[in-house]
Amino acid sequence: MFQLIEQQDGLSIGVFGIGGCGCNTLNSIYEQREGKQAKLFSVNTDKVVLEHTQSDDAVLIGAELTHGYGAGADPEIGLQAAQESKEQLLTLINSCDILLCAAGLGGGTGTGASPYVAQLAREQNKPVIFVATLPFSSEGQFRSNIAQAGLNELKEHANAVITLPNDQLIEVLGNDVGLFDAFKHSNQILHSLIKSLIDMLCYQGLINVDLNDFAKIMDCQGDAVLGVGKCDEESEFTTALDSALNNPLVNQVDMSSSSGVIVQVNCKDEISLGSYNLITDTVRQQVSPNALVICGVSKIENLASNYELLIIATGASAKMVVEPHDKIADSELKKPEAVITQPQASDIFDIPAFIRNQSPPPNKE
Ligand SMILES: Nc1nc2c(ncn2[C@@H]2O[C@H](COP(=O)(O)OP(=O)(O)OP(=O)(O)O)[C@@H](O)[C@H]2O)c(=O)[nH]1
């Protein structure tokens, strides 16, 4: 259990992007952020990626150990790098009340440094939530094993870990989607999950989910799932609820087993009592009768759609495991190598670091 922080002049939220994937997610958040409700912190062993990441503060971890060249898909190096930079990490952690972190599991930095960041945060009594991707099966069993071990360790330290398996991108977007488009889509989802959490915690609600409520739900042991649904008309709530509850990209836990749920409705204007009851009743029916369900409603005038539903369920048991390697034949996927043989210098930072690091540097003419 973490102790609750007195909320004084509003909540200070730190969004941490750890490793290549985490930094890509920060770029997506930075480009689209409206206010400064959250501070963005990039953390990486890779100096070049860090220099091209838009954030409010950056920490090159393990500069002595890796000389800024990345962790080479070795989580032990990622961990040691984070340990080397403990003081800088603590400075960032102590500057916020709650940490929302994004990382890709399967490489060295995100996998090795994330559990350590979570551990430091918990030691400082800061709630810490992770949104983490799992690698494509086509990236091989080695990365998949690294990711699984990292995930287990992360779950030991973070209050909640929401996973986004990259393989699910194929299910949603189809086999023909380009790799970079798929990553952009996934980063957009990571972004929208984090943004919804920020909105929920920052805006004073008509029915408020505050940090105490949030802490109670996040302390439920087990897997966590988070879904977002959006609509413009109240008549579309059923569809929006369906996308929040059944988004295959995030829906990997058995909702019926979850013991804590937050249902947050953000609206530009007002919501009718009937619609509010429909939403909360539908969610209650999906979870165990003993589950703690906390509902909030906030008015956010600059919301992109008229209504936005955020559902966070915790304390659930896992429904799905990562698909076995041979489920999708490698040949069915676009090979990353084929896409990046000759990257243009201008495109280079669209290429995920974990692929870029495996390819020769681009011509700099
Ligand atoms: N969805 C998504 N996944 C990514 C992205 N970049 C990398 N990944 C995934 O995240 C895993 C880890 O890659 P990175 O985040 O680049 O690796 P890292 O943590 O920086 O580790 P090192 O490069 O070894 O230091 C990869 O195996 C991919 O599955 C991205 O932009 N979006």
Image (spheres, rainbow, N blue to C red):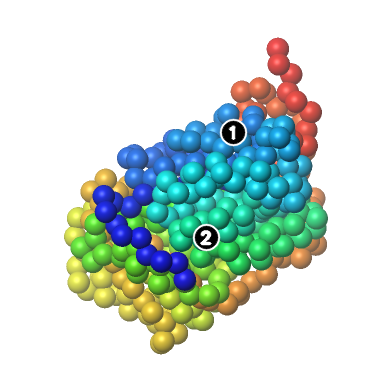
Q: Where is residue 147 in the image (x, y as percent from the top left)?
A: 70, 58
Q: Percent from the top left, x then y, of residue 338?
A: 77, 37
Q: Can you tell which mark lies on residue 310?
A: none
Quadrant of the image occupied by residue 167: bottom right
> For the residue marked with disc 1, what is the amino acid?
Leu
Badge 1: few (under 14), some or many (20 or more) residues near its Cα, within 10 Å?
Answer: many
In the rendered image of this protein, does residue 14 appear above or below residue 222? above
Q: Where is residue 183 in the image (x, y as percent from the top left)?
A: 60, 45
Question: Foreground residue, 61 or 326?
Answer: 61
> In what element is the residue under mark 2?
helix
* Residue with the mark numbered 1: 50
Q: In this view, does 299 lie to the left or right of 164?
A: left
Q: Is residue 349 among the parts visible in the rendering?
A: yes
Given residues 213 and 244, the one toward you in this image is 213
User: For the residue marked with disc 2, what is the amino acid?
Assistant: Glu
> Residue 176: in sight, yes or no?
no
The secondary structure type at the circle numbered 1 is: helix
> Residue 32 falls in which quadrant of the image?
top left
User: Separation of disc 1 and disc 2 at Cα?
Assistant: 26 Å
Give x and y (percent) for residue 225.
50, 67
Q: Name the residue under label 2.
A: 123
Query: In front: mark 1 or mark 2?
Result: 2
- First reached walking from the N terminus: tag 1 or tag 2: 1
